[in-house]
Image (spheres, rainbow, N blue to C red):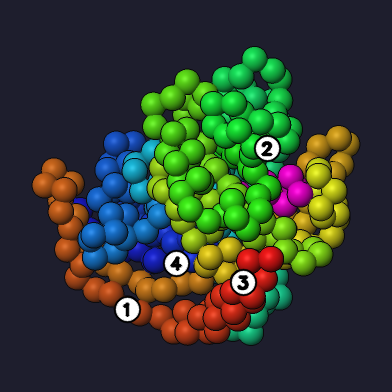
């Protein structure tokens, strides 16, 4: 099969965007999963954290389906939604749109550039659920709010929430960011285990200056990524719940691939988060895929220049983190 695609990233969390709206592809469910495993493999010519399928929607401007690099489907993807927001808005000539995702129709809009030359989009992260059944997390209690999980760590305090994909968040010290602690416990809860039967995205959050945090995430279905948009949103909310940040106020969220802004809203007892950040395209490509042989060839790859500007932002972020993260 012949496929055209765009490779892009949000905070260095990179995706292959495949447009099923205008290209008329009719992939089966297993083909979508197999394509994710084949094309996202970092040893191949493309490589990515996942595939974003952009599909026609009956009740929104477009629909996003997200497949992780291991072929599993996720209910939501914050960094990916910014890319799909850009794709659908540019395709349809819109400044704002509604995108259907697995569990909710979400508002997206184009925003002033966070950094000169960096296309910037705001996406809604919602619904937010604390019931452990929403992740699921098998503990004999209804919620987990800044509490220990004996099986995972003697001293870390975790909060579990679904936004609506599942997240486990711990606020940590600089020392706890070092070493293998996050990797070991993330591999445990993303392998066969009784606690999280569907796996979970695991974030370590380090408060920086007032109004700023650093978030590192081990993603379900992928491993460590440069950033995870839903994780940064969930982590911002957790810092508000713990009095480290304020509701309705922009929080600067630093990550290994850049920086986003999150604003946590509370209305009628429910939370919703605005995630604002880059939607950068790297290249357009055309490929020819043989799924039965699990091979593909790239017939065209057209690099775009946007990344050069993004790298300036990323350079500044890395410099800032090199001085603030240790404290
Ligand atoms: N990187 C994404 C989340 C992708 C899905 C996640 N790995 C899951 O399985 O829930 C983001 O930016 O939110």
- Secondary element at image label 1: strand
Q: Earlier in the sequence, mark 2 or mark 3?
A: 2
Locate the C terminus and report the quarter of the image it occupies.
bottom right
Along the viewing direction, whichever of 97 and 265 lies nearer the viewer: 265
Is label 2 in contact with label 1 (beta carbons under 8 Å)? no
**Residue 224 on image: x %, y %:** 45, 53
Please, what is the dominant secondary structure of the magenta stretch?
helix
Q: Residue 286, position in %: x, y?
A: 26, 67
Q: Are marks 4 and 2 in contact (CB under 8 Å)?
A: no
Q: Which residues are magenta?
A: 231-239
Residue 317 as seen in the image, left or right of residue 208: left
- Give the Cα distance between marks 2 and 1: 46 Å
Q: Residue at x 19, y 70 (%)?
A: 299
For disc 2, the marked residue is: 157
Residue that appears at 81% across and 64% down: 210
Is 26 magenta? The answer is no
Which label was assigned to residue 302? 1
Of the residues tagged 4 and 2, which is closer to the observer? Answer: 2
Please name which of the two marks, 1 or 3, marks the residue nearer to the observer.
3
| Mark 1 beta carbon near ligand 1 (under 8 Å) | no
> Considering only vertical position in the picture, is 41 above or below 259?
above
| Whether the residue under disc 3 has CB within 8 Å of ligand 1 | no
Residue 156 seen from this side: yes
Residue drawn at x 29%, y 36% is 30
Instruction: Answer with mark 3 or mark 4, whichever residue precedes in sequence.
Output: 4
**According to the image, label 3 marks what residue?**
321
Q: CA distance from mark 4 to mark 2?
A: 35 Å
């Amino acid at each position: 099969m012949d496929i055209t695609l765009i490779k892009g990233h949000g905070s260095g969390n990179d995706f292959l965007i495949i447009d099923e709206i205008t290209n008329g592809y009719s992939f089966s469910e297993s083909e979508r999963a197999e394509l994710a495993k084949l094309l996202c493999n970092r040893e191949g010519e493309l490589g990515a954290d996942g595939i974003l399928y952009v599909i026609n929607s009956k009740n929104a401007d477009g629909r996003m389906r997200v497949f992780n690099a291991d072929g599993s489907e996720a209910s939501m993807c914050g960094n990916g939604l910014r890319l799909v927001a850009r794709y659908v808005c540019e395709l349809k000539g819109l400044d704002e749109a509604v995108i259907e995702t697995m569990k909710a129709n979400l508002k997206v809009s184009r925003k002033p550039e966070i950094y000169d030359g960096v296309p910037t989009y705001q996406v809604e992260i919602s619904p937010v659920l604390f019931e452990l059944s929403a992740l699921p997390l098998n503990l004999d209690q209804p919620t987990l709010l800044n509490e220990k999980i004996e099986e995972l760590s003697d001293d870390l305090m975790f909060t579990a929430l679904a936004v609506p994909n599942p997240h486990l968040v711990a606020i940590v010290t600089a020392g706890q960011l070092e070493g293998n602690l996050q990797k070991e416990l993330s591999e445990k809860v993303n392998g066969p285990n009784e606690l999280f039967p569907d796996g979970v995205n695991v974030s370590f959050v380090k408060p920086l200056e007032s109004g700023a945090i650093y978030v590192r995430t081990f993603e379900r279905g992928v491993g460590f990524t440069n950033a995870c948009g839903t994780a940064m949103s969930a982590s911002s909310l957790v810092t508000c719940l713990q009095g480290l940040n304020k509701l309705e106020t922009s929080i600067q969220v630093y990550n290994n691939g850049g920086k986003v802004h999150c604003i946590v809203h509370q209305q009628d007892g429910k939370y919703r988060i605005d995630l604002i950040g880059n939607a950068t395209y790297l290249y357009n490509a055309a490929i020819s895929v043989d799924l039965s042989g699990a091979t593909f060839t790239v017939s065209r790859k057209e690099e775009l220049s946007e990344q050069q500007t993004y790298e300036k932002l990323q350079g500044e972020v890395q410099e800032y983190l090199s001085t603030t993260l240790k404290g």
